[in-house]
Amino acid sequence: MTGFQESLSATADYINSIIKPQPSSDADVTLLKAMQDVAFQGNILLFYDRGIIEKLVSNNILDDSQKAEFQRIDDEISNCIHVTLCAERFQSDDNAKNIATVRDVVNRFHVIATDLKSLSDKLGTNEYGLSVMAKEHKGLADRADYFINEFMKLKG
């Protein structure tokens, strides 16, 4: 090996030694990525939810109790997104805690979908797309739920 190759090899070894350690397995990386995806998709849904709510408010369709219910749902979605954005904790070795946290977020998205569907039914109009958003939240929860089940099989 020439001096240049040895120097290059030593440099590569040094760089590899300072790279931050990665999660312990591909499954951990996958869990982290899935939760980041949930946060990203949740943020998109939240943006659309807020647009729909703004249209409902500006057209005087909501009474005060319905506005309060939408605000509660908005707060719940924001909280779920916050939990998923803190996904670095999913790189820990405590898989039981990780899965419990993920399942909690998934269950909360299912409740959000049910609450949005209920409000849509009470309003009696889909002109503003509220029932579509309820289906999208349910879809997000269903996809995350599917992922958890696959993750559990992998970690089994």
Image (cartoon, grey):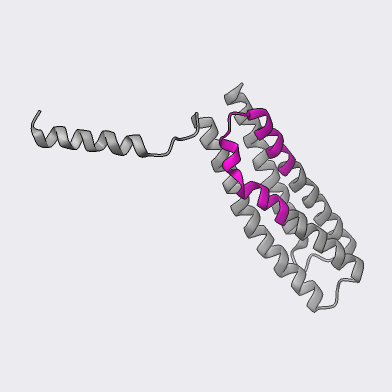
Residue 145 in the magenta stretch? The answer is no
Quadrant housing the C terminus: top right
Residues in magenta?
Answer: 78-105
| Percent coordinates x, y for residue 83 in the rendering | 67, 47
- Does residue 9 appear left or right of residue 16 in this picture? left
Measured as percent of width and height from the top left, residue 47 is found at: 66, 64
Please state the total of marks drawn on the protein image: 0
Q: Residue at x 61, y 30 (%)?
A: 150
What residue is rendered at 87% in x and 71% in y?
62
Residue 80 visible in image = yes
Q: Main secondary structure of the magenta part?
A: helix
Quadrant where the image shows the N terminus: top left
* Residue 23: image location, x then y, percent: 50, 33
Q: Is residue 81 magenta?
A: yes
| In the image, farthest residue toward the top | 156
Q: Residue, x 66% and y 52% (percent of image)?
A: 82
Residue 126 figure quarter? bottom right
Q: Give the farthest residue toward the left.
A: 2
Whether 127 is drawn above or below 12: the answer is below
- In this rendering, the answer to whether 82 lies above or below 10 is below
